[in-house]
Structure formats: structure tokens, C-alpha cells
Amino acid sequence: MKNASIIIGITGLPGSGKSNLLRCLRLLGIPCLSADRVVQDILERNPQVLMTAFPEVFQEGHLNKKLLAQTVFESPQALWVLEDVLHPLVYQEIQDFIREHMSNPLVALEIPLLFETSDLSLFDEILEAHCDEQERHQRLLSRGWSIERINGSLHRYIKQEERHRLASQVIPTDQGKVKAWLYMKNALEHLCKP
């Protein structure tokens, strides 16, 4: 689905600063959608979408998100099943969001696994949030992630070098928010040139 808007994809490894870049775009008045937020909204609105695939994570008819997280962390097969259930729903919401905002010059979508799961032809520009590994780990640890979870999550992502090659631009996020936002501003100016 192509349209009049320039579609910007924001991606990066866990803890790389994607959400900060999305906040910058929101403050500039650009319609933004986070795939992670879409998943949360789907599960809040209709947790029953997981009932058939994951009956064991429901207690008294209610989704136990901690148990779901533990289940998919411990089993790659369970993660694949979860993604098979949720990805079509997320994709539909992304399509609806783009349609709703197609009159805007720019639309931004934050998709952590953009390179791994998305149709890259949907995007006119892909911005990769990047910071060094030590900084990423520190950010994730401060959010309550364990070292096991950090290391366990990385197998789902393509290598950093390949991510940089595929991205239109790499936005450094380990020099402070102001610098990251300046890099973002420069990227947007590049996009908006006639």
C-alpha cells in the first residue's frame, strides 16, 4: 500500500533509543505508531485472541502477561506461535493507521523487528537507532531486564552490520537526547528536500 505520505520506519535493537526518536517525531507533529503499543492495545482489547494457542497463560479467564512472557522466552516455538497470531493483527492496524494519516506529509512507524518481519517496500526511509552495546545493556538493565533476557532477545535480530547496511540512515542515540534529536532533525530535513 503506497500513498502520498512519506513512510518512515524507526527500528533498532532493544535499548537502542527507538522510543526516544519516536517521541521527537511526535513532538514535531508527525503521526506516529509503535508496533509494541499496538500489541499491548490488542491484548488489552481482546486477550482472547490468544486463548486457543496459549490456554495455559489464562487464569480464571484472564490473560497472565507475565506467564505469557515467560512461556515465549523459554520456547522459541511458543514465540513463533505468538507472532503467527499477533503479526497479522498488528499489520492490519499499521495499514489502517497509514490510511487514516495518508494526508500527512510524513508518517512514522516504530517496529523493533522491522528488518526481520516487515515488507521493506512499505517504507520510504528507514532510520536505525544505534548506541553501543554497553549503553544498550545499561538501559535495559535499568528497565528491569535480566542479562538472560537481554542475551536471549538478540537471536531474533539480524546482525548490527546488516542493520546499518539496510537502513537509510543510522541515528546515534548514545550522545544524549538533544544530539539524537538533532540527528533526527537532519534526517527529516533530508527527507523533506524537494
Image: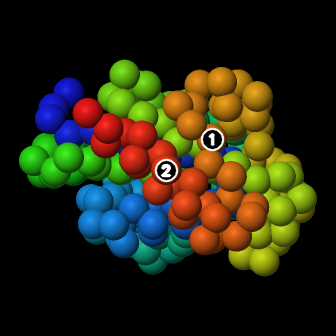
Q: Amino acid at mark 1?
A: Val
Left or right, residue 112 beside residue 188: right
Sequence-wise, which precedes: disc 2 or disc 1?
A: 1
Q: Which mark is residue 170?
A: 1
Left or right, residue 56 beside residue 61: right
Q: How is the image coloured?
A: rainbow
Q: Secondary structure at mark 1?
A: strand
Compute the Cα span from label 2 to label 1: 12 Å
Q: Is residue 19 above or below residue 153?
A: below
Left or right, residue 180 beside residue 38: right
Quadrant in the rendering for residue 148: bottom right
Quadrant in the rendering for residue 70: bottom right
Quadrant in the rendering for residue 24: bottom left
Residue situated in front as seen by the camera: 86 or 63: 86
Q: Is residue 5 above or below residue 139?
A: above
Q: Quadrant of the N terminus?
A: top left
Residue 189 appears in the rendering: yes
Q: Which residue is mark 2?
A: 186
Q: Secondary structure at mark 2?
A: helix
Residue 100 on image: x %, y % = 12, 51
Residue 160 on image: x %, y % = 75, 34
The image shows a total of numbered marks equal to 2
Residue 85 on image: x %, y % = 41, 41
Point 59% across, 25% down: residue = 166
Point 16% across, 32% down: residue = 3
Q: Quadrant of the C terminus?
A: top left
Point 27% across, 59% down: residue = 31
Please state which of the two labelled residues, at mark 2 or mark 1, is closer to the viewer: 2
Q: Which mark is residue 75?
A: none
Q: Crowding at label 2, few (<14), some or many (≥20) Cα neighbours within 10 Å? A: few
